[in-house]
Image (tube, rainbow, N blue to C red):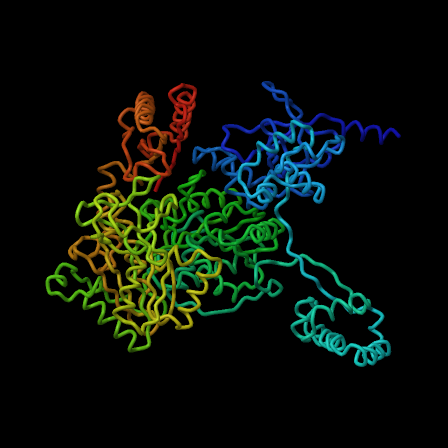
Amino acid sequence: MLEFADGLQATRKTLFVEVILPLAISRNYTYRVPFELNNAISIGKRVVVQFGKSKLYTAVVANITEHAPEKYEAKYIIDILDEQPVVTGQQLQFWQWLSEYYMCNEGEVMNAALPSALKLASETKVMLNKDFEYDKALLHDKEYLITEALDIQPELTISDIAKLLGQKTVMPILKSLFEKNIITISEEVSERYKPRKRTYLTLNPAYHNQENLRELFIILEKRAPKQADAVLAFIKLSRQQKAVSKNELIEESGSGESSIKSLIEKEVFIAEDRNVSRLGYDEDEDQLSNFVLSPAQETALADAKEQFLEKDVVLLHGVTSSGKTQIYIKLIEDMIATGRQVLYLLPEIALTTHIIERLRVYFGGMIGVYHSRFNDNERVEVWQKVLNNEYKVVLGARSSVFLPFSDLGLIIVDEEHETSYKQFDPAPRYNARDAAIYLANMYKGKVLLGSATPSFETYYNARVHKYGLVELTERYGGVQLPLIEVVSISEETKRKTMQSHFSSVLMQDIQLALDNKEQVILFQNRRGYAPVLMCRVCAYTPKCINCDVSLTYHKHTHKLHCHYCGYKEDSPTICPACGSTHLEYKGFGTEKVEDELSVLMPNVRLARMDLDTTRSRNSLQTILNNLEEKKIDVLVGTQMVAKGLDFADVTVIGIINADSLLKYPDYRANERSYQMLAQVSGRAGRRDKQGKVVIQTYDPNHRVIKQVIANDYNDLYFTEMEERKSFKYPPYFRIISMDLKHKNPEILYNQAEYLATELRRHFGDRVIGPEAPLINRIRNYYIKSIMLKFERDTISIVKAKAIIRDVIIQFQTTKLSKGSIIQPDVDPY
């Protein structure tokens, strides 16, 4: 009895939990744990809490304490959702670091980190009040309809009622019913994730006896031959595999579902619903296949391993098609042999879908894939498999850094220079490459950064020996770098040899490739048909009603689109300003390139790869498969085609207009242009054939184009770094930018001036701005930007961030701040 009493006393200890809410709030809140849940509560579990008057949220337990909050009375948590924690202690530490480094809130990090199916939806549910009697004759028509529906179905959500009545606004009607005490309204939390189920069949043990089985066949062949076929098919399948699903049996036997159902009812088969993977590949086989590295790859691999003895981060600087992936695979094999996990980061889903097929050959069911194209349930499934250490390798886009690893030994960041690793909206505005370095350090793991055109920050860190550096200077298999020819658009225009946007040189090279049964990729880094529609009489240009941008014409929808907010309108045939019919499309995007080439070469099999053609789930994979199977002759695309695609028969690359890259008003324009041009060029030529790249430009003597032709990354690096140093840009200086937004431009001006003045009091001329960005209104919010530059080695960035936070908090206490949105961005590049 004494032991029981002691245990009871322990469970009645008053516990409080600090929780992270999925909201952009400045701090975490503390809730009280009901005594009966004391033994079930633990850090990393999800709990349901009330925040505000009636809203319920899923929160994650970050800390457990016996101390009550001093400034408010703690509410009780309502329920615990997990038997085991779904968030690890290391993840919580990682979330905290991200929120501090990138100047956001832990709730914003939680929103980015957790799959949405692990975040519960608060749905208002409506029920009839069972304790109240009412006269239906006194109800209005819509009130009567709702009560009738609730008689049939005891609970309805507000969205159900809106559909029932065929109108969006139903709250006034519900308010009336509530005030009459006819209904009750409650906030219910619904769990989104449901494991995928599949019905598996086993033969009743009674029929393991051969005599009983023979008698069964005699009966079925006479009375139900389809059922006899199903039993025969089951026996055949069960010899080939461990488990037989109902769907497999229906397909194999040719029997209908009714035959299988009858056999289950007769207890010939025993049916069992099991959780199965949604991930679409066999996870039972683990296989490692051997391949031979070239001498250059062997040397690079040995150098990387040696440098990992002293450095936590190593840069593998290898030219395009040098075989970096094979080196990655060898390092992954070594890490798997030690029992540790590997995260393989890729910047684009295009790369993910293409490379996963290669890696499955080597790693089979040990590899998991994680990216935004997966639906909620699939993402939760990967989350759980990583949490349970079932996956040794995870391949994914930037959000993969949030997965619940247990023993992460190596992170590979392929194409580390890519801007896709940076999240710009919403917060946290993190760079997955930089976050990966901190993440690996938490697990005492290593990071390999791979690129043919490294970011200047990474290359700088390697040159000053902060990172290790491994060079791979030759293409795998002795394949030559492509021949690059620059074509002057102005010269071809003078000679009248341009056909639409295609020079005579490019057209000849396309035709030659097609004659040789080879493939072509055409690059134009703008989607849509035409970026501007203009009246030739009055120069009117349609603009977005929400943003300060011209609308882009999309021919396939015959609509004008805003690429910032999604607004669409019909393309006019008459100028809305002057009534003229002389409307002209200016500029061109991938859609127009595809359209023009289909006219010039009507027999060519064309495809387009951009955001518009890859929105649906399997569309991107279909394009890549068709290219690999040579069902496509010419692929037109945006920067998606530059991301590591490796197809043996692509021998010609055409860059339709390089000037849009070179003329962009940004201090990184030359670096980004070189990276893009070099990466696109790297898609040309493989194995036994030298590729050809045609760069069309109005400025053939541009320094960057000459550096691309010479494949001279170092010349670009040293030239640009001199300018970076002179003008106080990274990597010599750290940058924190701040976007201030408001719907009223005059109020915004005053807010921005106030903030800039306060920041200058602390940082002086390190503060630049406020100034309007290139696009100064998006989604009806006007924008002002303030930039702060800090010397890398002499200023404490931690102290600077603390001061900036204090200035923002102080500003938010003033009346002037009303209606403002402030978005700090650390390392905004």
| Residue 108 in the image: above or below residue 597 | above
Quarter of the image where the N terminus is located = top right
Q: In this view, does 410 lie above or below 180?
A: below
* Residue at image point 31% right, 74% down: 603
Please state the total of marks drawn on the protein image: 0
To which quarter of the image does residue 166 belong? top right
- Residue at 34%, 68% in the rendered image: 606
Quarter occupied by residue 234 = bottom right
At 36% across and 62% down in the image, what residue appears? Answer: 608
Q: Where is residue 731 in the image (x, y as percent from the top left)?
A: 31, 41
Task: Residue at the far right: name it.
Answer: 1
Q: Nearer the viewer, residue 309 or 775?
A: 775
Q: Where residue 71 sits: x, y (%)? A: 58, 18
- The quadrant of the image that shows the C terminus is top left
Q: Is residue 478 visible?
A: no
Residue 534 visible in the current orientation: yes
Q: 365 or 268, which lies in front? A: 268
Is residue 582 or residue 385 the one in the foreground? 582
User: Residue 586 at x, y = what percent?
Assistant: 23, 53
